[in-house]
Amino acid sequence: MKKIAVLFPGQGAQSIGMGKTFYDQFQTAREVINHASSFYGEDLTKLIFEENDRIHQTLNTQKAIITTSLSIYHVLKERLGRDFDATIGFSLGEYAALYAAGVFDFETTFELIRLRGIWMEEASTKFPGGMIALVGGSIEDIQKLCNFYIEQGYLCQIANFNSPLQKVLSCSREILDEIIEHASEFGIKRAVKLNVSGAFHSPFMSEAALQMESQVLKTTSNPPSIDIIMNATHKELDYAELAETMKQQMEGPVYFEDSVRHLVEKGIEVFIEVGPGNVLTSLIKKMGFDVQAISINEVSDLDKLGGIE
C-alpha cells in the first residue's frame, strides 16, 4: 500500500464557489460547512459560494479556506477508506493539517483561525505590507535584493521557500511595486504581487505570533496521531514545542520545499492536495521527486484516486 500525505493550501488560494460541488453532492461536506457556520454565527455558504468582496479580507479568507479544505478532506477520507500517513499545511493550511493529525478538534481549529484572522488583520493595519512571488534567481540574488531595501530601512525578506525556482518575499507596502519593476536587475525572471493583505511570515506579524503562542498554551490539544511536518522546522512536530512552533510559523518563513523533501526521504509516495486551487501540487511536480502529486478541489477530481487505492 502506497504511503500518502495530505496537503492543505494557504491564503491566496481562495475563490468564489470553491468546494461547492462537494457541498452539493456530499452530506459529509455539508455537515462540515454547517458546523462552521454555526460556530462563526454566519452562513458561510454566502461567503464561499456567492459573489462578494469579503472573501479576500484576511478575517474572512482564513475561515473560508479552512472550512472548504476540511469539508473536502472528510469526503476524501471516506472515499479512500484509510488513514493518511502524514500531513502538511501551507501557512494557514497548517491549522487544517493539525486538525487532520488529531492535534485540535473542530471547535479549537475554528477558534484559532478566528483569532488568527483578527490578530493578523490588526498587525497588517499597524505594519502595512504585502507579498511578492519570485520565479528564478538564486538565494544569493534574492538576498542581495532584500539587503538593498533593508539598508534603506524597509522590511524585505524571504517568507516562503516554495521550490528550487520559486520564493516569496514579504515587504513593506511602500516598496512592493518598486521591487516588481526592478526584480530583473537582481537576476529574477518574474515577480508577481500576491492577493494577500499583509507581509505574512515576517517580523511584521510578531505581535500576532505572541498572541497565538499564548492562546495555544491554554488550549486543549492532543499529540499527533500521524506525522505532521511543521512549516517553521520542516520536521515532525515536537508536541512539547507546539505553541512555540506555531509562534515561529507566524513570524518566520515557510519551508515548504524542505518539508516535502523530508517526507519523500521518509517514503511518502503520493501527495494529495485538498482544498481550493492546485498550487502545492504544481510546486511538488516541479521539484523533480519520483512521487505522485494530485489535487482534489472538485468532485470530478476524485477519479484521480483510482491509481492509488
Image (tube, rainbow, N blue to C red):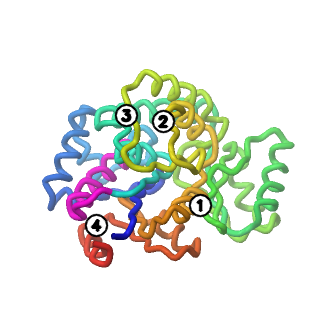
Q: Quadrant of residue 204?
A: top right
Amino acid type of disc 2?
A: Tyr
User: Which of disc 4 and disc 1 is earlier in sequence?
Assistant: 1
Q: CA distance from mark 1 to mark 4?
A: 25 Å
- Which quadrant does the C terminus fall into? bottom left
Q: Is residue 65 magenta?
A: yes
Asked whether 109 or 100 is in front, the reply is 100
User: Which of disc 1 and disc 3 is earlier in sequence?
Assistant: 3
Q: Are marks 4 and 2 in contact (CB under 8 Å)?
A: no
Residue 239's disc number: 2
SS for callout 2: helix
Name above or below for residue 128 compared with residue 182: above
Q: Position of residue 280 (x, y in %)?
A: 48, 63
**Residue linked to disc 3:** 222
Asked whether 290 or 12 is in front, the reply is 290
Q: CA distance from mark 1 to mark 2?
A: 22 Å
Q: Are marks 3 and 1 in contact (CB under 8 Å)?
A: no
Q: Residue at x 40, y 43 (%)?
A: 98
Q: CA distance from mark 4 to mark 2?
A: 34 Å
**In this rendering, position of residue 268 left or right of residue 171:** left
SS for callout 4: loop
**Residue linked to disc 1:** 257
**Residue linked to disc 4:** 298
* Comparing labels 1 and 4, the label whose residue is closer to the camera: 1
SS for callout 3: loop
The boundaries of the magenta stretch are 63-83
Q: Position of residue 303 (x, y in %)?
A: 26, 75
Amino acid type of disc 1?
A: Glu
